[in-house]
Amino acid sequence: SPGSLAGGHLSANNRKTQMEMKPFKNVAVVGMHFRERDGIPAKAYVESFVPPLELRLEREPDNAYDQFAIKVIFNEEHIGYIEAAKAMFISPWIDQGVAVTCTVNELETRRNNLHPICTIEAYDAEAVDENTPD
């Protein structure tokens, strides 16, 4: 009956939080030429990257240009953003509390700028915590 189909659809939505996030591959970090700290441009950091390298991600929901914005942090410096076309799919996972890793796999030149190309995937924080001495 149509009613049971609707009910099934609702329960599928409720299960969404238990779904596993599949890895996002070939995700570019962008916006580095706008960033500078103490006279050091963010792209200078990027030029020194030797993959594989871990970067930290941080949601920026109040970003005026992109409600799905995800800041990319290296050595506590904000060096850029996850490209918008991918951020819109990744940010809901972060907003739900999924812990993610961001690994730079390669550096790619686009329009004379060097961009870190990353894989972003979920990791099980509880499993990591179990292996951490108190």
Image (tube, helix red, strand yellow):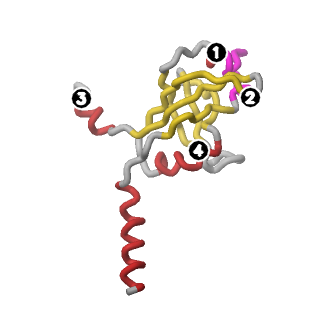
User: Label 3 neighbourhood size at 10 Å, few (<14), some (14-19), many (20+)?
Assistant: few
Q: Secondary structure at mark 1?
A: helix
Q: CA distance from mark 3 to mark 4?
A: 30 Å
Q: Position of residue 69 (x, y in %)?
A: 61, 43
Q: Position of residue 41 (x, y in %)?
A: 70, 19
Labelled pair 3, 1 in contact (Cβ < 8 Å): no
Residue 47 marker: 1
Q: Which residues are magenta?
A: 32-44
Question: Would you say 1 lies left or right of 116 here?
Answer: left
Labelled pair 1, 2 in contact (Cβ < 8 Å): no
Mark 3 vs mark 2: which is more N-terminal?
2
Answer above or below: position of 82 versus 42: below
Q: Amino acid at mark 1?
A: Glu
Task: Identify the residue shown where x is 72% and y is 15%.
Answer: 39
Q: Between residue 1 and residue 62, name the one nearer to us.
A: 1
Please give the residue where the numbered disc 2 appears in the rendered image. 34
Labelled pair 3, 2 in contact (Cβ < 8 Å): no
Q: Depth-wise, is mark 4 or mark 2 nearer the camera? A: 4
Q: Quadrant of residue 87?
A: top right
Task: Identify the residue shown where x is 68% and y is 20%.
Answer: 43
Q: CA distance from mark 1 to mark 2?
A: 15 Å
Q: Between residue 116 and residue 67, name the one nearer to us.
A: 116
